[in-house]
């Protein structure tokens, strides 16, 4: 907020008063060139000094959508949606300026982020993210992007975030989180995926039955293993008759339980989000 007289200050600059709200940094310019960066609070503008660009310091999300992508195993994805949470890069801690709960870096803002046209960077984030995601998906198999019961999906998201940061860090920006949303698969790809999951679980059930005969478990552990095997066998029969999306999600949950029992790391905090994503990927969310 530029205080009185607003019309003259906006056109010619100070002297005057500038009030910056928390969560923003402001680039000031004088004689057509950036003069300094100020944080929240009251600032007195120098003669002919005016606001050049407002830089949000809080994290913002940018929805990104790409279509018709091929994975490493040549599976087609019709539509891939994800969110990129981004902000101005605060840089090394020793060079950060604290402003309430947030931080900013004067050098990065002046030398990388500042734009004489005061342009926002959301379009840039979207464009870079689309390009990186299309290239990244081509390096992964479909089952490494969709699963919820192991670390492969988390690794994919981390790789996607790192790839985006390799580009936007040079521009003074930072992607803090990348989260996958809806994935739409063609009918043929969806059927192939269900068939692979079905065959995989048939093999797992046979191995699990053999394991229970060859190893000594505690009473509690044995009960858990037998319960998992029983659920897998029942669902396998259901899949052979008339598979439903609920059966597939249940199978993935059993896989999650199996990994937990075996001590394999799983992303607990993503369990609910990823389950919904799979329902959407199967195109059945409205039916449930």
Image (tube, rainbow, N blue to C red):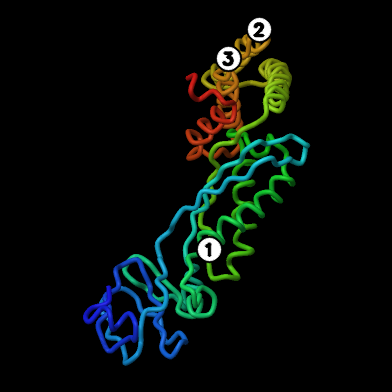
| x and y, in percent, of residue 236 in the image | 65, 13
Q: Quadrant of residue 150?
A: top right
Measure the C-alpha gap from mark 1 to mark 3: 44 Å
Which numbered disc, 2 or 1, marks the residue that appears first in the sequence?
Answer: 1
Which numbered disc, 2 or 3, marks the residue that appears first in the sequence?
Answer: 3
Marks counted in the figure total: 3
- Regarding mark 2 in the picture, which secondary structure is present there? helix
Q: Are discs 2 and 1 less than 8 Å apart at CB? A: no
**128 in relation to 118, above or below:** above
| x and y, in percent, of residue 284 in the image | 54, 23
Q: Which of 276 and 30 lies nearest the eye of the viewer?
A: 30
| x and y, in percent, of residue 184 in the image | 61, 33
Q: Quadrant of residue 185?
A: top right
Name the residue carrying label 1.
174
Q: Quadrant of residue 168?
A: bottom right
Mark 3 crowd level (few <14, some 14–19, many ≥20, 10 Å Cα): some
Left or right position of 52 against 210: left
- Residue at point 40%, 76% (across, down): 97
Left or right position of 107 against 155: left
Name the residue carrying label 3.
231
- Regarding mark 1 in the picture, which secondary structure is present there? strand
- Regarding mark 3 in the picture, which secondary structure is present there? helix
Measure the C-alpha gap from mark 2 to mark 3: 16 Å
Mark 2 crowd level (few <14, some 14–19, many ≥20, 10 Å Cα): few
**Quadrant including the N terminus:** bottom left
Q: Are discs 2 and 3 less than 8 Å apart at CB? A: no
**12 in relation to 248, above or below:** below
Name the residue carrying label 2.
241
Q: Which of 186 and 268 lies nearest the eye of the viewer?
A: 186
- Residue at point 43%, 72% (across, down): 104
């Amino acid at each position: 907020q530029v205080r009185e007289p607003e019309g003259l200050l906006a056109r010619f600059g100070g002297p005057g008063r500038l009030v910056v709200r928390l969560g923003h940094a402001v680039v000031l310019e004088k004689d057509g060139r950036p003069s300094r960066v100020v944080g929240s609070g009251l600032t007195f503008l120098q003669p002919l000094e005016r606001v050049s660009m407002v830089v949000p310091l809080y994290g913002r999300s940018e929805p990104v959508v790409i279509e018709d992508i091929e994975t490493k195993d040549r599976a087609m994805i019709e539509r891939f949606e994800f969110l990129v949470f981004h902000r101005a890069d605060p840089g090394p801690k020793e060079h950060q300026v604290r402003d309430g709960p947030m931080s900013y870096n004067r050098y990065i803002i002046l030398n990388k982020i500042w734009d004489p046209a005061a342009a926002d960077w959301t379009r840039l984030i979207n464009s870079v993210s689309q390009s990186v995601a299309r290239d990244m998906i081509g390096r992964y198999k479909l089952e490494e992007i969709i699963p919820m019961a192991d670390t492969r999906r988390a690794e994919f998201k981390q790789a996607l975030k790192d790839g985006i940061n390799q580009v936007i860090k040079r521009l003074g920006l930072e992607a803090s989180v990348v989260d996958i949303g809806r994935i739409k698969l063609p009918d043929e790809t969806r059927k192939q995926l269900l068939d692979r999951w079905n065959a995989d679980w048939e093999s797992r059930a046979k191995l699990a039955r053999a394991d229970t005969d060859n190893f000594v478990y505690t009473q509690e552990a044995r009960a858990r293993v037998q319960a998992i095997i029983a659920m897998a066998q029942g669902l396998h029969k259901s899949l052979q008759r008339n598979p439903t999306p609920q059966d597939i999600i249940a199978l993935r949950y059993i896989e999650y339980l199996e990994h937990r029992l075996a001590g394999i790391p799983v992303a607990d905090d993503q369990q609910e989000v990823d389950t919904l994503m799979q329902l959407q990927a199967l195109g059945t969310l409205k039916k449930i």
